[in-house]
């Protein structure tokens, strides 16, 4: 036995087969298949004592040392690990045939194409899955906001950056729908939402610089208009493709068509078919005929070019093609098509979707302001709202007519007017006239809203003084000194005068109201305290304590200072009792409405209801918000009672003797001229203030050159308006007696009744004489020597232009009087 039999494992002698290449296991492991441990470096001889199995030789003989392979060669019998490689001797590469090379390139190209397609498919799938199609309801289309008169039907204005009114598909006539389909996408109800030929053509045109006409489907057009831009780019078309496909899968064709018809632009500022129907034909989309629908269908491709006002022949030619296409699709009978003529189209008068330029423009501006400040709508132009105002169409027309009728023939280049009418029960403004025009392209035009202008109210302010007195121990029967002139401690040397220097030593406050005695009411304000009178007026008329600093209607020097005071000083004197400090015509209407409502103040407002474009009411305004009792009911009743005779005494009584409480007012600028004239009055259901003056401060005269007083032109406007709007309405009673007794100590002594003259004794006629009378000698009566009376010179009479003289704020006797009765003052 060989010396190494206990460790070496070899085949039998003479074995020709090479043992498997699997390595033997570690020493002591059994079996021929055991794994041989890795050996670094060369294998050692069989005589090693490390316990590792000796390396096998090529021949398999046991006990012989291994044979080292030749340098650079392979193992004997093998050609390397793993057996033969198919390579030629010497390690060279086998050359491929041409067929093999073609097959190899085909496999590479096919693999690349398949890979790209797979990647594209994955990309498309991911993009499609991640593409979100906004709900049509979530798309913010700028819709026209419509402002209505109080009836909720008659339109006053349409406001929008875009003239757009959304409607449902069933509110669009079928002929009009078919005309659009015939012009833009006849296969709309059968296509997948996109036009492959149109996309390819658009891509080719982009590459070659050709025309950008797209040939898109209605779905693609809707996607472009609603979600994308109009850029002719690959990226936009790519987005359009995915959105159109997904939109077509998620929404019905009718839904897509409806939103498309509400989105497209038809020209002349009209977005959507409803606005277009109104703009071009003055009708609704539901009433469009086939002829009219074809006109609108032609406009879709190029609104400006195919507008019949711009290209009548081209528009008519394409119009005929649209109708012919409708016949070809079976949507229009050929017999009905033959006699069709191009329909009449309204002239292009501009966009027309803003506020009107007339008196109603001021109302629209105030509605905007109210919606922003009180209802939280910053941009009503794009909200598609339906706003119902408090303005009565009949009342507004009556206001405009009254101003125009009375001012016919007057100097309208100089004179300005304002009229505001308020419902005392709600504070809703019924009529509003601030000027004849609210807008003008002429920079020299006067577009001032005089219903908001601060003007001195004169005697029309006296009811607030009376109300303050009635809350402090006076009654309408209290007698006061109404002589003229009078001086007061706060005006030493500057007397206050009544208009026409009227005299009344102890008139009741009701009589002083009717006769508009300045001395009486100045004295009341002095005794009561000017700030107390101001507080009453502020509460009744809704006048702020301080004129807002950002008020664009406040004149220079007033904003930021106390109301009812000397501008820029915050000083309020007794002159407040006779209307020295400025107020707005709308505030006078509100203040008198407070008296009419029994002392309950309702803030003036113009909005009565807000709805969305579908007509769903979002909010109603009934005037209850902010309403409060600011004057005791008995005081308001007695103020009304005190003013019931003013209209008749001013020759401005209402038709049929209808009960009405009113007050005139006139403000002077010197001893002769007036600058402002007022007439304010009310019934329980309506309070109206009328003002007349100039753009600044200038004398006001009528066409005959006479001075204008409150009962003159302003009174005539007030009277005509009130008679018109109250015609046919039930007569409303006013208080028939005073409620407040008052403190008798507040009165001056009543005048002693003048003794009646004794009747002369009756003499019998003498018997006729038959004798001639004796001649008499007549002695002439000497003429008395004239004397010059001694008078105290009043500086305001000597120089009526002195600014410190309190001129104005009164009315002639009778609450307004007529020219020639004397200078109103005090």
Image: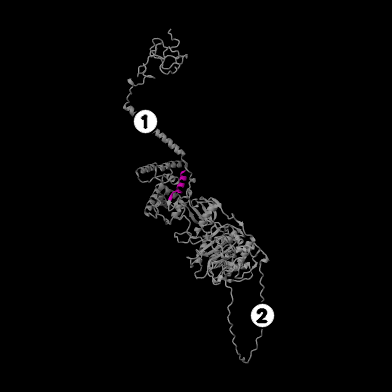
Q: Which residue is drawn at 60% across and 88% down?
A: 779
**Residue of label 1:** 108
Furthest-top residue in view? 1
> Where residue 421 sits: x, y (%)?
55, 61
**Residue of label 2:** 759
Q: In which quarter of the image is the N terminus?
A: top left
> Where residue 249 sits: x, y (%)?
46, 41
Magenta segment's dominant SS is helix
> Where residue 73 sits: x, y (%)?
35, 18
* 2 or 1: tag closer to the N-terminus: 1
| Nearer to the camera, 746 or 510 | 746
At label 1, counting other C-alpha atoms closer than 10 Å, the crowd grade (few under 14, some 14-19, many 20 or more) is: few
Label count reads 2
The structure's colour scheme is one colour
Furthest-left residue in view? 98
746 magenta-colored: no
Left or right: where 393 falls relative to 97: right
Span of residues in magenta: 252-265
261 magenta-colored: yes
Regarding mark 2 in the picture, which secondary structure is present there? loop
Choose top left, top right, bottom left or bottom right for residue 197: top left
| Nearer to the camera, 171 or 29 | 29
């Amino acid at each position: 036995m060989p010396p190494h039999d206990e460790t070496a494992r070899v085949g039998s002698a003479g074995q020709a087969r090479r043992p498997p290449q699997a390595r033997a296991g570690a020493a002591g492991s059994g079996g021929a298949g055991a794994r041989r441990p890795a050996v670094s470096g060369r294998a050692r001889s069989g005589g090693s004592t490390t316990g590792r199995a000796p390396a096998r030789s090529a021949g398999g003989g046991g006990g012989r040392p291994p044979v080292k392979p030749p340098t650079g060669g392979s193992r004997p019998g093998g050609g390397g690990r793993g057996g033969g490689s198919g390579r030629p001797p010497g390690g060279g590469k086998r050359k491929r045939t041409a067929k093999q090379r073609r097959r190899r390139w085909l496999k590479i190209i096919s693999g690349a194409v398949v890979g790209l397609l797979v990647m594209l498919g994955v990309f498309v799938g991911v993009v499609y899955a991640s593409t979100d199609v906004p709900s049509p309801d979530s798309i913010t289309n700028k819709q026209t906001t419509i402002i209505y008169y109080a009836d909720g039907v008659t339109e006053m204005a349409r406001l929008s950056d875009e003239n757009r009114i959304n409607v449902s598909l069933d509110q669009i006539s079928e002929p009009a729908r078919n005309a659009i389909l015939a012009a833009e996408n006849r296969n709309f109800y059968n296509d997948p939402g996109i036009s492959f030929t149109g996309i390819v053509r658009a891509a080719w045109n982009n590459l070659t610089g050709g025309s950008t006409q797209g040939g898109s489907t209605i779905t693609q057009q809707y996607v472009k208009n609603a979600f994308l831009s109009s850029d002719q780019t690959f990226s936009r078309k790519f987005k359009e493709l995915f959105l159109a496909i997904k939109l077509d899968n998620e929404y019905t064709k009718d839904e897509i068509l409806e939103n498309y018809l509400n989105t497209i632009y038809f020209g002349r500022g009209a977005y959507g078919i409803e606005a277009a129907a109104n703009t071009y034909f003055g009708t609704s989309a539901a009433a469009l005929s086939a002829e009219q629908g074809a006109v609108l269908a032609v406009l879709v491709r190029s609104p400006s070019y195919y507008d019949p006002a711009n290209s009548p022949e081209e528009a008519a030619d394409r119009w005929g093609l649209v109708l012919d296409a409708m016949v070809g699709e079976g949507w229009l009978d050929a017999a009905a098509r033959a006699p069709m003529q191009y329909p009449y189209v309204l002239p292009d008068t501009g966009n027309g979707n803003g506020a009107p330029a007339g008196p109603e423009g001021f109302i629209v501006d105030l509605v905007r302001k109210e919606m922003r400040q009180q209802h939280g709508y910053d941009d009503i132009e794009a909200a598609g709202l339906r706003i119902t105002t408090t303005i009565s169409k009949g009342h507004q027309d009556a206001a405009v007519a009254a101003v125009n009728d009375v001012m016919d023939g007057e100097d309208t280049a100089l004179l300005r007017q304002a009229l505001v009418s308020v419902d005392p029960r709600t504070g809703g403004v019924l009529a509003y006239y601030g000027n004849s025009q609210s807008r003008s392209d002429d920079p020299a035009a006067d577009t001032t809203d005089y219903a908001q202008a601060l003007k001195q109210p004169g005697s029309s302010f006296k009811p607030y003084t009376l109300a303050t007195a009635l809350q402090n121990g006076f009654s309408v029967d209290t007698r006061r000194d109404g002589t003229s002139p009078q001086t007061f401690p706060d005006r030493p040397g500057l007397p206050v005068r009544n208009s026409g220097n009227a005299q009344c030593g102890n008139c009741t406050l009701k009589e002083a109201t009717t006769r508009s005695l300045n001395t009486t009411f100045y004295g009341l304000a002095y005794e009561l305290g000017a700030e107390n009178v101001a507080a009453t007026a502020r509460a009744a008329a809704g006048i702020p304590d301080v004129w807002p600093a950002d008020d664009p209607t406040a004149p220079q020097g007033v904003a930021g200072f106390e109301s009812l005071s000397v501008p820029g000083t915050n000083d309020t004197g007794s002159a407040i009792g006779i209307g020295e400090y400025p107020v707005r015509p709308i505030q006078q209407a509100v203040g008198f409405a407070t008296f009419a409502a029994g002392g309950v103040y309702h803030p003036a407002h113009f909005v009565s209801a807000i709805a969305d474009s579908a007509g769903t009411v979002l909010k109603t305004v009934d005037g209850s918000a902010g309403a409060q009792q600011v004057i005791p009911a008995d005081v308001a009743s007695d103020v009304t009672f005190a003013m019931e005779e003013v209209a008749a005494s001013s020759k401005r009584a209402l038709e049929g003797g209808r009960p009405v409480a009113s007050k005139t007012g006139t403000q002077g600028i010197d001893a002769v001229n007036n600058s402002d004239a007022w007439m304010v009055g009310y019934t329980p259901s309506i309070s109206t203030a009328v003002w007349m003056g100039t753009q600044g401060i200038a004398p006001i005269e009528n066409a005959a050159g006479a001075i204008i007083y409150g009962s003159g032109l302003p009174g005539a406007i007030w009277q005509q308006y009130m008679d018109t709007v109250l015609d046919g309405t039930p007569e409303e009673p006013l208080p028939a007696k005073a409620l407040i007794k008052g403190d008798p100590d507040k009165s001056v002594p009543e005048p002693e009744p003048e003794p009646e003259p004794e009747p002369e004794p009756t003499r019998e006629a003498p018997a006729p004489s038959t004798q001639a009378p004796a001649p008499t000698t007549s002695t002439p009566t000497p003429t008395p020597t004239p004397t010059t009376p001694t008078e105290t010179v009043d500086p305001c009479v000597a120089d009526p232009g002195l600014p410190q003289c309190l001129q104005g704020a009164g009315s002639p006797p009778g609450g307004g009087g007529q020219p020639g009765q004397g200078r109103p003052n005090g």
